[in-house]
Amino acid sequence: MSIEDKLARARARLDRVEPDRAAALQREGALVVDIRPHANRLVEGEIPEALVVERIVLEWRLDPHGDHRLPELTAETPVVIVCNEGYASSLAAADAQELGLHRATDLVGGFRAWKSAGLPVVAGGSPAIP
């Protein structure tokens, strides 16, 4: 299987959201999880109130039944995962669904689509949740 096949399979399971819908979900209590590298966040900015979680520990933080999960996370928590352009986030959201977060999805076009849509952005560089 190629990475394109893997991405297509992941996206087939997701109800991916456009930037305006992601912002509405965040206002309604969804967790927006930014998995972009620090360098990208520092240069391009961040989504206000998004949780920054390094990709290397993401599954541990998003396992709704795990000891290392984010404290506010339950199996019913809506989660929108954000990367630069919406590729890595699709794979991560599919992984989160496999862990039991059935309402996990990702942002179509990633952070760059959010910013292009004119949605709020704050200065980047927030520390990631360890």
Image (cartoon, rainbow, N blue to C red):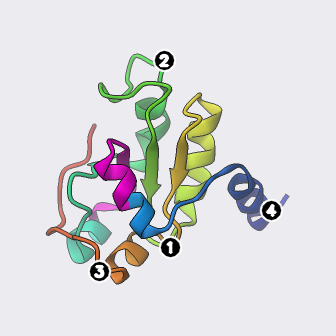
Instruction: Say which element carries label 1.
Output: loop
| Secondary structure under the numbered disc 4 in the rendered image | helix
The answer to whether the residues at label 1 and label 2 have Cβ atoms under 8 Å apart is no
Q: Disc 3 or disc 4, which is closer to the eye?
A: 3
**Nearer the observer, 128 or 70:** 70
* Residue 50 shows in the view: yes
Which label sits on residue 65? 2
Q: Which mark is residue 118?
A: 3
- Residue at the limit of the structure toward the right, as seen here: 1
The residue carrying mark 1 is 109
Question: Which of the two discs, 1 and 3, sits closer to the camera?
Answer: 3
* Residue at which label 4 appears: 5
Q: Where residue 52 is drawn, which disc sits there?
A: none
Task: Report helix, strand or loop for mark 2.
Answer: loop
| Residue at mark 4 to residue at mark 2: CA–CA distance | 29 Å
Q: Looking at numbered disc 2 in the image, what kind of residue is underneath it?
A: His
Which sits earlier in the primary sequence, circle 3 or circle 4? 4
- Measure the C-alpha gap from mark 2 to mark 3: 36 Å
In the image, what residue occupies the spot 28% across and 62% down? 38
- First in sequence: mark 1 or mark 2? 2
Q: Where's the C terminus, which quadrant?
A: top left
Compute the Cα span from label 1 to label 4.
Answer: 18 Å
Say which of marks 1 and 4 sits in front. Answer: 1
The answer to whether residue 9 is left or right of residue 92 is right
- Does the stretch in magenta take in 76? no
Q: Name which residue lies at 70% across and 53% down.
A: 10
Where is residue 31 shown, x and y percent of the image? Answer: 35, 44
Looking at the rendered structure, the kind of residue marked 3 is Gly
